[in-house]
Amino acid sequence: MEREQTVVAPYRYAPITSRPSWSWPDGKRVAVYVALGVESYRLGGGHTEDLLHGVPAPDLVNAAWRDYGNRVGAFRVLDRLGELGIPPTVLLNTDVYDAAPEVAEAARKLDAEFVGHGLSNSDSLQGMSPAEERAYLGAVAERIHQEEGRAPQGWSSPWLTQTTSTLESLTAAGYRYLLDLRADDQPLWLDTPGAPLLAIPYPLELNDSTSMISRGVTARDFADMIVDEFDELLEAADRQPVVLGIVVHSFISGAPFRLHPLTRALRHLRAQDAAWFTQPAAIADIFTAAVPPPAPAPAPLSETP
């Protein structure tokens, strides 16, 4: 009889009350990054994000809703971030380079950091063999390197799914950090068999997809969530530096009625001197210098037959 595989979190427990002392640049207390999901979907195959469920094929209604992001929404969000002086982080499906190259060009003009987010958001790492997964991650990194002149440092999984080999595959493909997990308000080192891999706090709830589309949170309530999260973290940051991430998508927050309250929330954050508006790679640089990766975890003892 086969034993069930025990899944263990790939990070070690350490309460935030007993961390090393360090700080963000210029004494800033909250590192804020705003990530824009720029995605491509295959019509009629694979995973999709839908606003209306149960629409029979060909589902042009939901496809058009998603297409709004690369035709209109991405430009509106990027323009707004530029106006506010917030450096964008782009979670990029590399198929967008072919489907909507002007979006990448607009982000590039704002010195966006490009994070690998798959070839298409119709994909998922689930079901891939280790070899397939490694090739897939490598193909994304290679395309971004080709287009931007440098490989991505970070990865964000389509649909936030992983396999048992994902962390090892990421380090093998040259990725430095993962944007999938929110186990902490500070970055944390993941236990990997290869090179070090950092988990930078990912906003599972300060995310327009999980909150507004999946759970029906209104655009105004979403803006309030951002403000409340920031104000509360600002108080906690008297004791330790923290990270606040915000994830929006071009076809969701790019809609005018959502972009307006989002802008109100970002202006609130922008008015605070204690906020450091940055990108994940810069967060990784500061944290790695302050808290180097630990020694590899010891391998578990093998069972005696």
Image (tube, rainbow, N blue to C red):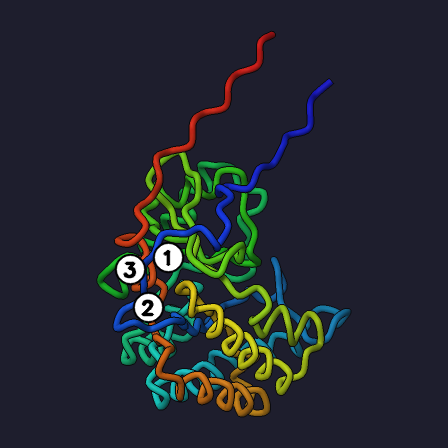
User: Looking at the picture, which amino acid does disc 2 mark?
Assistant: Glu
> How far, Cα to Cα, is label 3 from label 2?
16 Å
Image quadrant where one finds the N terminus: top right
Give the label on residue 286, or none: 3
Element type where label 3 sits in the image: helix
The answer to whether marks 3 and 2 mark residues whose Cβ atoms lie closer than 8 Å is no
Q: Residues within 10 Å of mark 3 (few under 14, many from 20)?
A: some
Mark 3 or mark 2, earlier in chain? 2
Q: Residue furthest top?
A: 305
Q: Which residue is mark 2?
A: 113
Q: Is residue 218 left or right of residue 90?
A: right
Helix, strand or loop at label 2? It is: strand
**Position of the C terminus by quadrant:** top right
Q: Nearer the viewer, residue 238 or 51?
A: 238
Q: Amino acid at mark 1?
A: Gly
Going by the picture, which residue comes out furthest to the left? 149
**Which amino acid, by three-letter code, is at mark 3?**
Ile
Residue 164 lies, with reference to residue 118, above or below; the image says above
Viewer-proximal residue, 281 or 224? 224
